[in-house]
Image: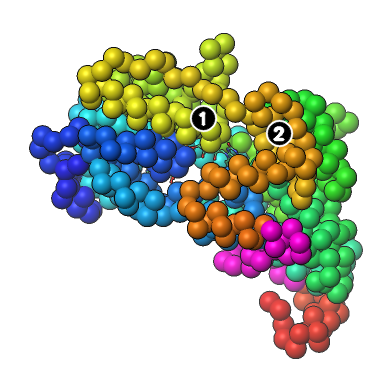
């Protein structure tokens, strides 16, 4: 890869040194797709540059455990430089790719630098979609980034703290009510974990409230939860959630979110649900760079912006550009779209890398990409999960053990696997959640405890218990 071309803050793109050497491959994004692509280039005669706006690979499937205090962010993130340090043909750059000039085979970064490529793999992933209602974001954070996961953790734990100090039963109720919008695997996992927090982890921690009285509602507009798993397993998952006190509300549409709760449209009419904690697990759209890529290459997209590709994952107009993961509209042989999951991104990443190596060697083009569907998994809580593995439907303990095994196996670093395993074992025995810190600030911090008479009693209560004002 040409060096010395990442000077900062220049107005014109600076190009990389166009020396002849091994073909230059740029990978945008070091998530599941990008990292697996980079690793598949190991020992290939190409110069690989991985560019990511974060210096870490994030294991998003365990993000809900950060949001619910089971794990710390560092346990599900691995520094990209460290992961790829032994791969001598690969360099890692921290940077935000903002534009592409496909005719010139060049990408430019937000800092003004630019890089030339012979082949490009775009694995820039997705971002949370609020279906055009971006103002909901401030009241309903999602779990797409480490920052958002810690904001959600903050909101959940802060809600119990506020409830502890409020004498008014309606207000307390609102703080002890939690709404999760979106009943895919993230929503289901969050609901199950929240129920465990309320019923087990916090059960002895408060003096004025009973955390187990918390109301946890999982809402989805679809007629059932877990749309990607077979119906019989979804029914089992719903039963397991209900047993844990979660109210599952399907065919219910969110029409508004604000500081004090949700507006809902149901078959029976419009409703209001008072809550101070709404968590968004409602869906994703393509990343900003994905939109730029589609525009610059005149690529066709589906309605969520995923790019339509040749069967070998290249863009029809620029066949040196591969698109993989959440940004790609991969299809099955029957034409149905592939889901936006880690397995698809990983397999596409490995395929794209091998296809490029074949082309560099002048070998026969690879066969079209074919997804090998290993199945789906969703965990509800301790000893409870559902799994479709190689066509078999499994639930309860066996599915839970498979879930544990699969998630540990795919964590990128051995050290993280060990630490996470120890945490889970400890949590299993004690129900404790070690990462229960309220850090940073969230919108809910703007809430003032009432200073008038009704607030005085609990404030006194709190200060007499601790000797100081908790806020
Ligand atoms: C909360 C949550 C839970 C999930 N749970 C599961 C699960 O249980 N099982 C499952 O299979 N899938 C799960 N998924 C989906 C899975 O994580 C994604 O399908 C997968 O990460 C897609 O891989 P990707 O490489 O396309 O994108 P990502 O893994 O999201 O990686 C994209 C990378 O690109 C970088 N990037 C983006 N734009 C730029 C830019 N302009 N410049 C530089 N870098 C950029 C980002 O920083 C990121 O590192 C979950 C997702 C979320 C959010």
Which residue is at the front of the view, 253 or 135? 253
Q: Quadrant of the N terminus?
A: top left
Q: Is residue 210 magenta?
A: no
Q: Residue at x 75, y 88 (%)?
A: 467
| Dot 1: element | helix
Which residue is at the front of the view, 107 or 131? 107
Write down the residue under mark 1. 344
Question: Do the residues under discs 1 and 2 have CB atoms within 8 angstroms?
Answer: no
Q: Please tell me whether residue 285 is drawn above or below residue 215 in the rendered image.
A: above
Q: Please tell me whether residue 290 is drawn above or below residue 272 in the rendered image.
A: above
| Disc 2 C-beta below 8 A from ligand 1 | no
Residue 53 visible to the viewer: yes
Q: Residue 435 got which mark?
A: none
Place of residue 167 in the rendered image (x, y in percent of width and height, measured from the top left): 87, 70
Q: Magenta span: helix, strand or loop, mainly?
A: loop
Q: Which residues are magenta?
A: 425-449
| Disc 1 C-beta below 8 A from ligand 1 | yes
In three-dimensional space, the C-alpha distance between marks 1 and 2, rounded to whole angstroms, equals 17 Å
- How many dots with numbers? 2
Place of residue 267 in the rendered image (x, y in percent of width and height, measured from the top left): 85, 28
**Residue at the top extreme?**
334
| Dot 2: element | strand
Write down the residue under mark 2. 387
Residue 263 visible to the viewer: no
Of the image marks 1 and 2, the number of the one nearer the N terminus: 1
Q: Residue at x 36, y 35 (%)?
A: 40
Q: Quadrant of the C terminus?
A: bottom right
């Amino acid at each position: 890869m040409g060096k010395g071309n990442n000077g900062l803050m220049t107005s014109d793109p600076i190009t990389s040194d166009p020396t002849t050497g091994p073909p230059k491959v740029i990978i945008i994004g070091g998530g599941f797709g990008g990292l697996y692509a980079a690793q598949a280039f190991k020992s290939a005669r190409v110069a690989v540059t991985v560019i990511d706006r974060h210096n870490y690979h994030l294991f998003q499937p365990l993000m809900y455990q950060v949001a619910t205090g089971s794990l710390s962010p560092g346990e599900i993130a691995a520094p990209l430089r460290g992961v790829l340090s032994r791969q001598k043909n690969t360099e890692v750059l921290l940077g935000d790719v903002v534009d592409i000039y496909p005719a010139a085979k060049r990408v430019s970064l937000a800092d003004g630098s630019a890089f030339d490529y012979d082949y490009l793999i775009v694995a820039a992933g997705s971002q949370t979609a609020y279906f055009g209602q971006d103002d909901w974001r401030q009241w309903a954070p999602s779990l797409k980034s480490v920052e958002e996961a810690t904001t959600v953790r903050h909101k959940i734990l802060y809600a119990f703290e506020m409830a502890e100090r409020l004498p008014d039963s309606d207000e307390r109720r609102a703080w002890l009510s939690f709404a999760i919008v979106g009943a895919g695997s993230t929503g289901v996992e969050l609901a199950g974990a929240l129920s465990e927090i309320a019923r087990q982890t916090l059960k002895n921690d408060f003096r004025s409230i009973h955390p187990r009285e918390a109301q946890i509602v999982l809402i989805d507009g679809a007629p059932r939860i877990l749309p990607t798993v077979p119906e019989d397993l979804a029914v089992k998952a719903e039963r397991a959630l209900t047993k844990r006190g979660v109210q599952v509300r399907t065919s219910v549409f969110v029409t508004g979110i604000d500081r004090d709760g949700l507006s809902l449209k149901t078959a029976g009419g419009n409703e209001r649900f008072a809550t101070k904690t709404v968590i968004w697990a409602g869906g994703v759209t393509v990343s900003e760079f994905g939109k730029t890529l589609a525009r610059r290459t005149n690529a066709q997209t589906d309605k969520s912006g995923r790019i339509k590709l040749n069967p070998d994952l290249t863009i029809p107009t620029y066949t040196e550009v591969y698109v993989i993961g959440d940004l790609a509209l991969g299809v099955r042989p029957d034409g149905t779209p592939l889901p936006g999951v880690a397995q698809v991104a990983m397999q596409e990443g490995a395929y794209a890398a091998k296809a490029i190596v074949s082309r560099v060697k002048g070998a026969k083009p690879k066969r079209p990409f074919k997804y090998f569907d290993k199945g789906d998994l969703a965990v509800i809580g301790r000893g409870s999960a559902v799994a479709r593995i190689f066509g078999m439907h499994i639930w309860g303990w066996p599915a839970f053990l498979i879930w544990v095994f699969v998630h540990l196996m795919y964590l990128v670093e051995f050290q993280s696997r060990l630490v996470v395993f120890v945490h889970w074992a400890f949590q299993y025995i004690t129900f404790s959640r070690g990462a229960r810190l309220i850090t940073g600030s969230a919108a809910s911090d703007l809430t003032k405890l009432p200073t008038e008479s009704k607030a005085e009693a609990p404030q006194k209560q709190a200060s007499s218990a601790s000797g100081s004002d908790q806020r």
